[in-house]
Image: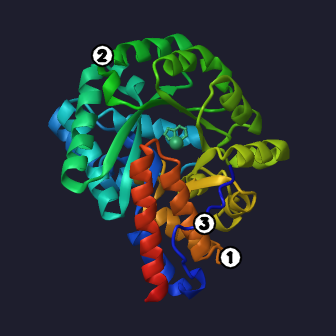
Amino acid sequence: MNSHATPSLPIDFQRIASSQLLEVVHKAPKAELHIHIEGSLEPELIFEMAARNGVALSYPSVQALRAAYAFTDLQSFLDVYYAGASVLQTEQDFHDMAWAYLSRAAAEGVVCAELFFDPQTHTERGIPMAVVIQGLKSACDRAQREWGLRAELILCFLRHLSEEAALQTLQDALPFREHFVGVGLDSSEKGHPPEKFARVFARAGDLGLHRVAHAGEEGPAAYIRTALDLLKVERIDHGVRCTEDPELVRRLARDGTPLTVCPLSNIKLCVFPDMGSHNLPQLLDAGLMVTVNSDDPAYFGGYLNENYSALLQAHPGLGARHAWQLLHNSLVSSFAPSDLKHAWLQRLDEHFARAALA
Ligand code: HPA
Ligand code: ZN
């Protein structure tokens, strides 16, 4: 399978002016496949929840907290991110966090959001699994009802913790098995290779869960290989370091393995020095199934459409055809049933065809 798809309708991409492109992209139907829901918690909501739950914060104000969002690498971010998540206590908190994100996503044209959540960040603080999952799930159900937005949950294991802890987490989540569609692997990548989690991913596979993993963000291309070979993942989260291994790039292209790339995140965490140096155009040229995502939008300076804007503005060589391809890839790479995907893809093509005629 190759990711260079053809639209279902004739679309004259040349007729979409670059001055029009961002607006066309912003209004297009799209999927978000790499969003840590705890990373959507805005400072204002952190302070509101801290106040209502009586949690002390080490920052005196929203402004002071936001000023601390100057990261040098993944770990410097994770330290602040886990501190922010400590205000989440009740089912209502989890609902409110997810609802804030989903409302925003709906306004940005997102028709499908697959949300990562980190149960261990909460259960380690004594918050019951039921509180976490039921709070998030009720917001997902509400998004479907109110916006027609399909929202699913993916349970992530924290890779800096042990595989035993991950196995226990999966076990504790089993009473809520129908509330999540897959498992993922996140947190500190370096020194925590995918093979550390081979047994828990095998168990998740036996349970019929989808499997994804962060790999090749800060860690080496070898982690992408072991995530594929040993964890049997269907998508790679980030994966931008695959270019260090040309044979791996050919394999990813041949298999159509989606990469959920997060442009603003990669700049904020210094994976690339600036957006103009981001290798996403190179990944697309290599025929990879690249998608654009926001990762932790409250911390990295932008939600999904801002990621598209920042990328397209920094790479004038990416035009309407490329933008369409990225949007198409996002919908194709979701875990939604194929009839839904086809309906979304048709809407995407009609949207671009209309823009080309305008
Ligand atoms: N990488 C790894 N773990 C994470 C991230 C990320 O970008 N965001 C939240 N947890
Ligand atoms: Zn991530």
Mark 1 or 2: in front is: 2
Tag 3 residue? 6
Kind of residue sitting beneath label 2: Pro
Q: Helix, strand, or loop for circle 2?
A: helix
Rendering coords of residue 277 (x, y %):
70, 64
Residue 175 circle label? 2
Dot 3 beta carbon under 8 Å from ligand 2: no
Q: Is residue 70 left or right of residue 149?
A: right
Q: Nearer the viewer, residue 217 or 289?
A: 289
> In the rendered structure, which amino acid carries the disc numbered 1?
Gly
Is residue 273 visible in the rendered image? The answer is no
Tell me the distance, in whole angstroms, between the alpha carbons under discs 3 and 2: 42 Å
Quarter holding residue 228: top right
Amino acid under label 3?
Answer: Thr
Q: Is residue 18 above or below residue 4?
A: below
What is the secondary structure assignment of the residue under circle 3? loop
Residue at image location 52% in from the left, 60% down from the top:
328
Residue 35, horizontal then vertical, whole percent: 44, 46
User: Considering only order in the chain, which callout, 2 or 1, is on the residue closer to the N terminus?
Assistant: 2
How dense is the environment of label 3, judged by Cα within 10 Å: few (below 14), some, or many (20 and up)?
few
Asked which secondary structure carries label 1, the reply is loop
Q: Nearer the viewer, mark 3 or mark 2?
A: 3
Q: Residue at x 35, y 36 (%)?
A: 85
Identify the mark nearer the N-term, 3 or 2. 3
Q: Which mark is residue 317?
A: 1
Q: Position of residue 318 (x, y in %)?
A: 64, 73
Query: Quadrant location of the C terminus?
Result: bottom left
Residue at coordinates 33% horizontally, 44% vertically from top-left?
151
